[in-house]
Amino acid sequence: MNLPILLRAFDTVMAVRAAAKRFSTPSRPPEPEQPPEAAVARGFVGQIENRLTNVIVAALKEAFDRDHARLELERTHLEEERRRAEALLRLEMRRQTVDREVARQRLLAGAAMTGWIVSVVLVATGAAGESTEARVALAMAWVLLLGALGVAFAAERRAGASSLDSEAAFNVPAGGAAPWLLMAGLAATAASLFV
């Protein structure tokens, strides 16, 4: 028999077996032996790292909580400012409405006063008729014009008073009668000229 061929075949089988073992199990480098002082030091460093990690996490949580509280405070502040601005806008709209109503009532009062003065001048100059019907029409015109003047002044006073009370509803129902009384008084004055 040929012994050298047999030895080579045996070496080949052993090499294939060693290669198969190496590929089938993951190779881990052997851990070097550490002295006990190094293991203690590594445990101490691990504890310090854990503590520092906990401190950093707590600091970040506190910072996030602080930011959240600040954002909530800012949101509340903005909401309060918005409500305040809306209230001021409502008050300004109310003030403008009251100002317009007061100006309208003053205009009506001025027109009623002018109409009454004209009717008095008509009586004083004798331009109005001398008949009883003309005098009755002038008396009715004076009553209507003075009524329009009084209603306009009362409505103006109520409108001014309602502007002071921000909770009261702005309503001047009697002020609506002043233009009708004024027109009726002026019509009666004109009628007294034609009677």
Image (cartoon, rainbow, N blue to C red):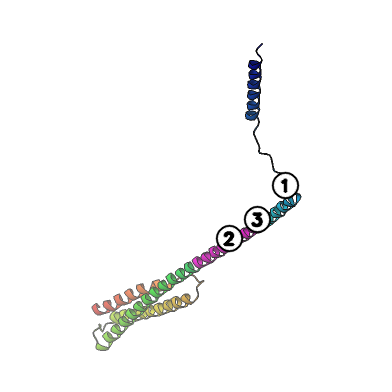
Tell me which secondary structure the magenta stretch mostly adopts.
Answer: helix
- Mark 2 vs 3, N-terminal side: 3
Judged from the image, the secondary structure of the residue bearing numbered disc 1 is loop
Does residue 73 show up magenta in the picture? yes
- Considering depth in this image, is 4 or 182 the residue closer to the camera? 4
Q: Which is more toward the observer, 158 or 177?
A: 158
Viewer-proximal residue among 162 and 1: 1
Would you name the residue on which mark 3 appears?
53
User: Between marks 2 and 1, how big is the CA–CA gap?
Assistant: 48 Å
Specify few, some or many for label 2: CA neighbours under 10 Å numbering under 14, 14-19, or 20 or more: few
Q: Residue furthest right?
A: 36
> What amino acid is at disc 3?
Thr
The residue segment tinted magenta is 54-83
Residue hosting label 2: 68
Task: Give the crowd class for mark 3: few <14, some 14-19, many >=20 residues within 10 Å.
Answer: few
* Residue highlighted by disc 1: 34
Q: Which mark is in front, 2 or 3?
A: 3
**Which quarter of the picture shows residue 100?**
bottom left
